[in-house]
Amino acid sequence: MPPKTLPPLSRRTLLRALGSGTALGGLAGCGVPAAYVRPGDRAAADLSSTEQRLNWANWPLYIDTDDEHPSRRPTLEAFEKRTGISVEYIEEINDNDEFFGKISPALMNHQSTGRDLIVVSDWMSARFVRLGWVQEMDRVRQPNVTRYLDPQLRSPAFDPGRTCTVPWQSGITGIAYNRRRTGREIRQVSDLWASDLKGRVTLLSGLDEAFALLMQGNGVDITRWTADDFHTVCDQVEKQVKGGQIRRFTGNDYIKDLSSGDVLACQAYSGDVIQLQADDPDIEFVVPDEGAELWAESLMIPNLARHKANAERLIDYYYDPEVAAELAAWVNYVCPVPAARDVLASAKDEESAALAENPLIFPDKEMRSRLAIARDIGSDERVEFSKRWNRIAGL
């Protein structure tokens, strides 16, 4: 099991303002010729056969570590031993837009980023794919991905067939609340607006994080939401802000507010709540009756990566159900390899076996029926929508 200390940094605290990264994304997404890279200009000479190494950029606390030796990463070390490939693993991604701004100058100028593998949220992955800044993967080298990738994550609108992206971990945006303190269940998005919760509700600050669940509360099919659906949600949230219902807008710092009791109910991520429950079993995570958003953060190989085949091999290694199970037991997010459930279920220790039955790690059929992947915010919509949402959220 993962250590019970919680991440100090958000993996999904995004879209803070229309700064340089977002502005560039808006321009590039509209098809600025200088930013788009044609398919024939994306690959570099692959040195994988002569250089047994690769560079991997990921988020903090997003891979298994040894409880007694936190600097060690058991699954990654096992890959290095098995393949002879040395991996330089860098926890340098703290925010999607920040990281986009960090590597976009190289990518838009047809230069190497120095990284062979990166992990960003799917809404940001969509931007990279639209810009032609990532390479298609060779699935011949990835039989585990082909066989074991969760069918519900196989073909997002921004990357049909997952040709350029592979989910690293997945998760659910739903509602967390303290059952003991509320004295009742919360089952619907509209329950957040109950009078007894006034001033003790938080919403996620990032546009891409918050909007889908709120739309689902209105009965909207988030796979095909419209601008009218978005503005309806904004009207509702504005009303709740003015009425004092919403305490504030947060990143992952809702964890502190919920733990302390300052907040009774909030938008939350499934993986965070599993960790919170270890210390406070009264905290519950809810997939509302109207449904919740299923999301992923995905592995991509950026343009001009020099060790593409090595990166593809590492990705496929993590889709081995045995490896995926070991990773899932540590990070506690939705595992993109459903077959890993059987591995954990057959484990001798009770903790691992219990994880196999946790629907927040391996959603059951009933829960899956209420999960949906939101269509991406298009480049022609983002500037307008961001301005309105950021004004409401005080960003």
Image (tube, rainbow, N blue to C red):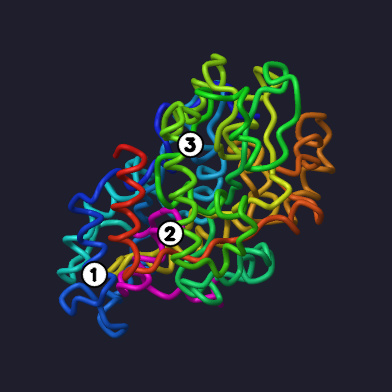
Number of residue marks: 3
Q: Is residue 161 visible?
A: yes
Nearer to the camera, 191 or 300: 191
Nearer to the camera, 285 or 82: 285
As drawn, the label of residue 28 is 1
Vertical order, 329 against 232 (above or below): above
Q: Check if residue 120 falls in the magenta segment.
A: yes
Question: What's the amino acid at mark 3?
Answer: Gln
Helix, strand or loop at label 2? It is: helix
Question: What's the amino acid at mark 1?
Answer: Ala
Assess disc 1: are there few (<14), some (14-19) or many (≥20) residues with their C-alpha within 10 Å of its C-alpha: many
Report the Cα–Cα distance between label 3 and label 2.
Answer: 27 Å
Among numbered discs 1 and 3, the one appearing first in the sequence: 1
Q: What residue did someone put label 2 on? A: 123
Residue 366 lies in what quarter of the image?
bottom right
**Which residue is located at x 68 percent, y 52 percent?**
291
Report the Cα–Cα distance between label 1 and label 3.
Answer: 35 Å
Report the Cα–Cα distance between label 2 and label 1.
Answer: 15 Å
State the extent of the magenta-drawn residues as a range: 116-141
Q: Are marks 3 and 2 in contact (CB under 8 Å)?
A: no
